[in-house]
Amino acid sequence: MTPTNYTLTTRERIPAARKVLLLLVISGLALMALGEGQSQDLSLSDIMKKLNDQDTKVRRAAVNELSRSSDTGAVDLLRYALNDSDAGIRRDAARVLGQKGDQNATADLIRSLEDPDRGVRAEAARALWDINDSRAVQPLVGALKDDDADVREWAALALISTGKPAEEQLLDALGGDTELIRWQAAAVLGRMKDPQATEPLTAALKDEKGSVRYWAAVALGEIGDTQATGPLVESLRDGQTKVRAGATWALQKIEGNRTLPTLVQALEREDRDLRIGSIWALGRINDPEAVGPLVQALEDGDSAIRAEAASALGARKDPHAAGPLSDAMRDPDSQVRRNAALAMAGINQSYAVEWMIAFLKDGDPSVRTDAAWALGTIGDEKASFPLLTAMGSETNSEARVAMARALKEIKKSQ
């Protein structure tokens, strides 16, 4: 445990668990005096005195002097400084120990991963990254649960640099008892890019928490093993948009220019949720040829598929989709009409305004609401009078509010 209370004397300033270390430091200084001469002994002795000075500035200066020292005894003094009452000095000591790269400090730095000051914890994790001692693997995995992002990032980097010795612990952490440790483990395994993690990460695509599923998908993309393609396609049915985005990104990393045919193949399956997820992905992959399958999906017999296709075309903002989307604005399903209109607003605003004005009279209040929102976003003055007219007869409160807001937005844009 890191001490929290210190008084002015050396005996009282050092926690009981550190008394042995102090004795070793003092003994080491005495031996160096015998073997190396009076000048070196005085230098290290003076630094030791400064580390016990009441003035924080003096103690910090002592740590700075140790950073320039090439003497092996400096490491022991820095380990001693990790117990200082001042968090800034503890941070400096941890940082300098990392620069020294001496594995004799590993145990002390591991203890500092539990320091009450987040800056000290981060510097300790960073130092362990510099030292690269496999003994720190398990504590570093535990640090992935830290509530501070810097601590987690340095712990992750330290684990990545450790390599194989860390992988087994990280694989165990994939089944950890907290969401945070599971997704952090997935993220680090991805950055390690070891194909042996493919199977456990594939299993993590079914984790109960969306953040774990997302990072498992991203990690599989980082690793690039084609064995993950099938499970990633299945993840396109996930109910969370972020997970679908992660799976889409991973598929592009793994499949490259084969992503489009992979998604088209999934679109041809009978699973409705998977088809919708594939359409969502087609709207976001970096391939202009994806417009073709999406336009075809606008003619699907399932209105949910048509609606998703219209939305995906809107996400792509490809002018080649303007014609098919204008036809979809006449679809018998109100959701399809609404999505097509919103997509058109992002592709051809002047053309979309006429349709949005027409939709102000649609029988579905949600379509009227979205039409008003789109008109306000476009900000075309010619929509003002139709909006005022529609407000006069509108019975749906949400639609009326949307129309009023649209009028304000149009007025602001003029």
Image (spheres, rainbow, N blue to C red):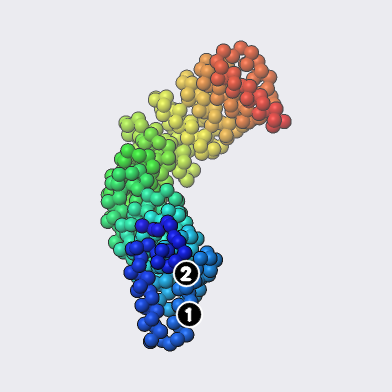
Q: Crowding near pointer 2: few (<14 within 10 Å), some, many (20+)?
A: many
Residue in the picture at 47% in, 69% down: 51
For label 1, the SS is helix
What is the distance, in whole Å, between disc 2 and disc 1 at their CAs? 13 Å
Whichever of labels 2 and 1 marks the residue nearer the N terminus, that label is: 1
Where residue 316 appears, as percent x and y from the top left, is 51, 39
- Residue pointed to by mark 2: 51
| Quarter of the image with the C terminus in it | top right
> In front: 265, or 236?
236
Task: Residue at 46% x, 38% y: name it.
Answer: 283
28 or 12, which lies in front? 12
Name the residue rendered at 53%, 18% in the picture: 365
Question: In the image shown, does 161 or 122 lie closer to the viewer?
Answer: 122
Q: Report the quarter where the N terminus lies.
A: bottom left
Which circle marks residue 139 in the picture? none
Where is residue 38 drawn, in percent x and y?
45, 86
Give the side of residue 124 with respect to residue 372, left or right: left
Residue 72 visible within the image: no
Amino acid marked by disc 1: Ser
| Above or below, comparing residue 114 to residue 177 in the picture | below
- Identified by mark 2, the residue type is Leu
Between 13 and 322, which is closer to the camera in this rendering? 13
- Residue at x 40% of width, y 39% of height: 244
Residue 310: % across, % down? 48, 31
Secondary structure beneath disc 2?
Answer: helix
Circle 1 sits on which residue? 43
**Horizontal relation, residue 86 to residue 381: left or right:** left
| Vertical side of 386 occupied by 185: above or below | below
